Image: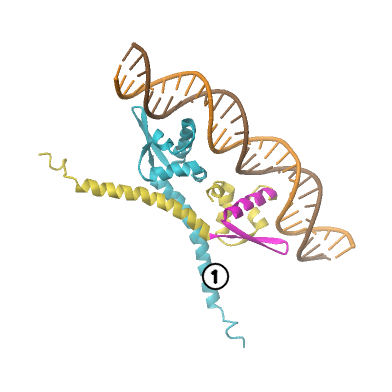
Chain colours: A yellow, B cyan, C orange, D brown
Amino acid sequence: MFQALADQTRRQMLDRLSRGPASVSELAEPFRMSLPAIVQHLKVLEESGLVRTEKVGRVRTCTMDPVSLGMVETWINDRRIGWEGRLDRLGAFLDALPAADDQPR
Amino acid sequence: MFQALADQTRRQMLDRLSRGPASVSELAEPFRMSLPAIVQHLKVLEESGLVRTEKVGRVRTCTMDPVSLGMVETWINDRRIGWEGRLDRLGAFLDALPAADDQPR
DNA sequence: GATTTAGTTAATATTATGCTTAACAAACCA
DNA sequence: TGGTTTGTTAAGCATAATATTAACTAAATC
């Protein structure tokens, strides 16, 4: 999933899909890229689980999967919180020390 | 930043740093990789803003920057929320319709 | 039935990434 | 001072990622 998010084009595609489903050519429209290139990006997004697609007739409709995005968010949040929690515990530890600076005597 | 997060090794390095600062060799210790490889990964992390480092004497100490992780989290959250908001508005719209199924007459 | 639309497949070129070894530099220690 | 620790720089290489063009398939439309 992180790999899928690493590409600017794919992030823009997700950005589009966050505003609602789209067909492959709607998804491709903002880019100067060839359609096969878009389809390859789409494949990466789909294999990562970030996007789901379904073909009806000759049009493939793409939808974002918010659950998988949530998993990425959770990973990041856990690390960030881990760091901040460490700071908090350090602060508590320092608070619990005799205040040498305040009471130099 | 997404690019920096795309690599498994770099994510593990961040994981380590989320539990507190580390020197370059401490950071390298869990890996079977050569030290230069680690330094290259570290460079990517530093250039992305996810990690800050400072060299004192001959040891370079690495620290995670939680702010930049927060930026990634925000990007993801915005898209996820955008999607869910869209669903909510759709639900509200459907609720506001005359309930054709309930009242077929 | 012929044509257009929508997407797919395959082959390939280019570039980027991740890793290695070798050689080097500076700080610390005995 | 000489040797060890800690990290850095450079060069080379294998693999993976991103894009292209050309050819093709299937569905919809005229």
Q: Nearer the viewer, residue A1 or D21?
A: A1
The residue shown at (72%, 64%) is A57
Tell me if I can see residue A30 in this picture: no
Which element is circle 1 on? helix
The residue shown at (26%, 47%) is A91
Q: Position of residue B53 (x, y in %)?
A: 39, 36
The correct choice, above or below, for A38 with respect to C14 in the image is below
Residue A39 in magenta stretch: yes
Residue A90 in magenta stretch: no
How many numbered discs, if any? Answer: 1
Q: Position of residue A3 (x, y in %)?
A: 55, 47
Q: Residue furthest left?
A: A105
Q: Nearer the viewer, residue A94 or D27?
A: A94
Q: Position of residue B84 (x, y in %)?
A: 50, 64
Q: What amino acid is found at the position of numbered circle 1 in the picture?
A: Leu
The correct choice, above or below, for A6 with respect to B89 in the image is above
Chain name for mark 1 = B
Q: Residue furthest bottom?
A: B105
Tell me if I can see residue A93 in this picture: yes
Crowdedness near tag 1: few (<14), some (14–19) or many (≥20) residues, C-alpha within 10 Å: few
Task: Name the image quarter holding residue A23.
Answer: bottom right
Task: Name the image quarter holding residue A58.
Answer: bottom right
Q: Is residue A98 left or right of residue B96?
A: left
Q: Which residues are magenta?
A: A36-65
The residue shown at (33%, 27%) is B57
Q: Position of residue D3 (x, y in %)?
A: 37, 18
Q: Is residue B22 left or right of residue A104?
A: right
The quadrant in which the C terminus of chain A is found is: top left
Q: Which residue is mark 1?
A: B90
The residue shown at (67%, 60%) is A60
